[in-house]
Image (tube, rainbow, N blue to C red):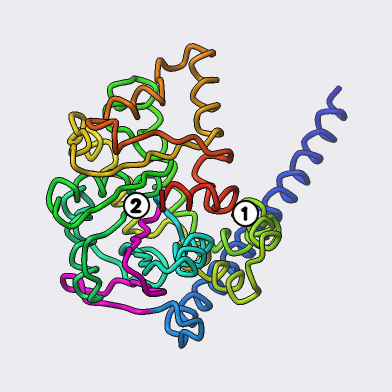
């Protein structure tokens, strides 16, 4: 028995040595990856833009990117969903097609997104709405506008309609956030968990794992799908670069921390009766919520939330489009464009 314990102890010491060596090796690999990532990041941030996508305008004390494409009487302003690394590339299926249909298309990249610089300003509904207004003014884009608000941008569009009602002729909300849903305990927990996960991920980003992931598992970022529907090599390269440089930035982190408060502050919001509105809901979003209801996790009724915001049924509607939640720009852009133009 004594000999057995001695052998066991020797084996344990060897195992500890191996584990320590593995941990040291992993630490070295992570450190090297982080160093290489951050060196590349600095080079990429300051590299000359060869795509023509970079057009920084002054907003407050810093610079924000606004891309204007096409000419036409209708001016469509695309507002990105939360944490989109490169809105200009991600929503190109909308901007290209709309510009071909004689629309002026404006894609705004919020602070911390795409080519825009970072900002330490508060990320409240009012502040974001004011920044959208300032960006359009600085870019010399005149109203009236048709806003295409994706995901969390719906909150900023709601506030914009309160602050600058004369600017908007139409609002298209794609898989939007419905403020009154924050009263639901599941939704409140979901928002809290989303905030926590985003904050943790923002720190992990320092290692450069998002850059690596975009190559070893491109489907996570829908890159395979983008290739299939015709995105060219320049756009894919730009998108990967922005994943590396704009994956959960500090500004995004401050924005997500405000999500619950931003929802609470707009709980009583309804669309102005004069404003034409198309609310686009993906079948994926609807099915996801219905499944949660079946599992007794929530009492949320997505269509009810959408319909409760309508004040003028003659010019305000809810449209269902086949596709995954927050991915309609890739899954079914043509149907969304119909909702924008009709």
Helix or strand or loop: what does disc 2 sit on? helix
Q: Quadrant of the image for the N terminus?
A: top right
Q: Is residue 166 above or below residue 314?
A: below
Q: Is residue 193 left or right of residue 282?
A: left
Check disc 2: other Cα within 10 Å, few if <14, some if 14-19, many if 20+: many
Residue in the picture at 42% in, 46% down = 198
Residue in the picture at 46% in, 63% down = 98
Q: Is residue 230 magenta?
A: no
Tell me where residue 342 appears, x and y as whole percent.
41, 48
Tell me where residue 29 appears, x and y as whole percent.
64, 64
Q: Is residue 309 above or below residue 203?
A: above
Q: Is residue 143 above or below residue 300?
A: below
Q: Which residues are magenta?
A: 55-80
Tell me where residue 100 appears, x and y as whole percent.
49, 69
Mark 1–mark 2 distance (CA, rounded to whole Å): 22 Å
Residue in the foreground of this view, choosing between 101 and 158: 101
Numbered circle sitting on residue 253:
2
Q: Is residue 70 magenta?
A: yes
Residue in the foreground of this view, choosing between 268 and 265: 268
Residue in the picture at 48% in, 49% down = 338
Q: Is residue 97 left or right of residue 25?
A: left
Classified by dominant secondary structure, the portion drawn in magenta counts as strand
**Image quadrant assignment for residue 117:** bottom left
Numbered circle sitting on residue 222:
1
Tell me where residue 165 appears, x and y as whole percent.
15, 50
């Amino acid at each position: 028995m004594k000999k057995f314990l001695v052998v066991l102890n020797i084996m344990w010491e060897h195992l500890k040595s191996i584990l320590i060596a593995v941990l040291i090796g992993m630490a070295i690999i992570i450190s090297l990856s982080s160093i290489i990532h951050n060196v590349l990041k600095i080079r990429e941030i300051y590299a000359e833009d060869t795509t023509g996508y970079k057009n920084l305008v002054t907003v407050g004390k810093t610079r924000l990117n606004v891309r204007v494409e096409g000419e036409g009487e209708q001016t469509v302003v695309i507002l990105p969903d939360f944490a989109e690394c490169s809105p200009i590339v991600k929503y190109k299926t909308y901007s290209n097609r709309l510009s071909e249909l004689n629309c002026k298309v404006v894609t705004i990249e919020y602070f911390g997104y795409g080519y825009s610089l970072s900002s330490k300003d508060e990320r409240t509904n009012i502040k974001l709405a004011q920044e959208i207004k300032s960006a359009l003014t600085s870019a010399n884009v005149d109203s009236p506008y048709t806003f295409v608000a994706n995901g969390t941008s719906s909150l900023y569009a709601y506030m914009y309609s309160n602050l600058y009602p004369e600017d908007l002729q139409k609002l298209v909300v794609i898989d939007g956030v419905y403020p009154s849903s924050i009263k639901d305990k599941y939704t409140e927990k979901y928002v809290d968990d989303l905030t926590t996960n985003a904050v943790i991920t923002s720190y992990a980003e320092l290692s450069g794992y998002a850059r690596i992931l975009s190559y070893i598992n491109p489907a996570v970022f829908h890159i395979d799908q983008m290739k299939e529907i015709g995105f060219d090599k320049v756009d894919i390269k730009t998108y990967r670069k922005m994943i590396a440089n704009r994956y959960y930035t500090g500004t995004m982190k401050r924005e997500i921390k405000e999500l619950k408060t931003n929802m609470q502050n707009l709980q009583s919001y309804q669309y102005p009766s004069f404003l034409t509105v198309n609310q686009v809901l993906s079948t994926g979003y609807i099915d996801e919520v219905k499944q949660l209801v079946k599992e007794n996790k929530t009492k949320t009724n997505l269509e009810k939330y959408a319909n409760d915001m309508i004040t003028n049924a003659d010019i305000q509607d809810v449209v269902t489009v086949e596709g995954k939640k927050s991915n309609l720009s890739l899954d079914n852009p043509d149907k969304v464009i119909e909702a924008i133009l009709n």
